[in-house]
Image (cartoon, rainbow, N blue to C red):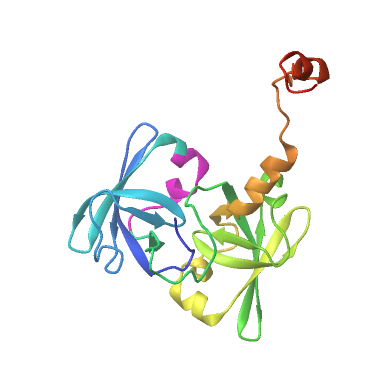
Amino acid sequence: MFTGIIEEVGEIINITHGAKSAKLTIKGKVVTGGSAIGDSIAVNGVCLTATTISGDIFTADVMAETMRRTALGRLKAGSKVNLERAMAADGRFGGHIVSGHIDGVGRIQSMVREDNAVWVAIEAPESILRLVIEKGSIAIDGISLTVAYVDSSSFKVSIIPHTASETTLLGKNVGDEVNLENDVIGKYVEKLMNYKSDVTEKKSGIDMNFLAQHGFMS
């Protein structure tokens, strides 16, 4: 589990492509510190497993399913990426619950400065937007952000200077794709609210006659 508070901006050193998969080699001085092979590291919000670690370099395998569902396939050597290690049990929970399991890909629609902040509008599919609420949380490329506006085709977040300097978001261009993860609590609530059982409810065989026959009633 992650918090969406980015620890550092790393760099893609190399990408080796398979038929549908990939292996990423990534430089990250902070996230490699104290990490071991098998640990989870979020790369632009995607939970990946470190398969090798050498100094400040680690590698991670990306399966075909992850390539299909995320924007990792658009990365190239030299690309900057947001990095975060899995949350320590004794750490502060500064963002929101982020699983690192991407729900879909959005596209930057516009960037507009307002005083010390920048409004970023993200065009997203209906499958994402139905779980986006104003003042709710969403992870964009792994960054925990608060939704300030939402309509039928897009949503907006406002980026403060600290977030701008510590992440890659404002280094992107209009039209660039970003990984999106909805608030996991919203996903569970939606599932529970819309759940319909396919199992026919069995009628109980316990009634007043049953209780009398078995001595529970006089």
Q: Position of residue 152 (x, y in %)?
A: 78, 53
- 39 relative to 200 in the view: left or right: left
User: Which picture quadrant has residue 211?
Assistant: top right
Q: Is residue 128 left or right of residue 140?
A: right
* Above or below: residue 216 compared with residue 65: above
At x 57%, y 49%, the residue is 105
Residue 87 within the magenta-colored segment of the rendering: no
Q: Quadrant of the C terminus?
A: top right
> How far from the left and from the top, in percent, is residue 30?
29, 69
Q: Is residue 75 one of those drawn in magenta?
A: yes
Viewer-closest of 48 and 213: 213
Point 34% across, 60% down: residue? 78
Q: State the residue lying farthest toward the bottom.
A: 115
The residue segment tinted magenta is 66-77
Q: Position of residue 32 (x, y in %)?
A: 26, 62
Q: Residue furthest left?
A: 54
Q: For the view shown, which residue lies furthest in the top direction?
A: 213
**Number of numbered callouts drawn:** 0
Residue 160 in sight: yes
Quadrant position of the N terminus in the picture = bottom left
* Residue 33 point in image, percent of width and height: 24, 66
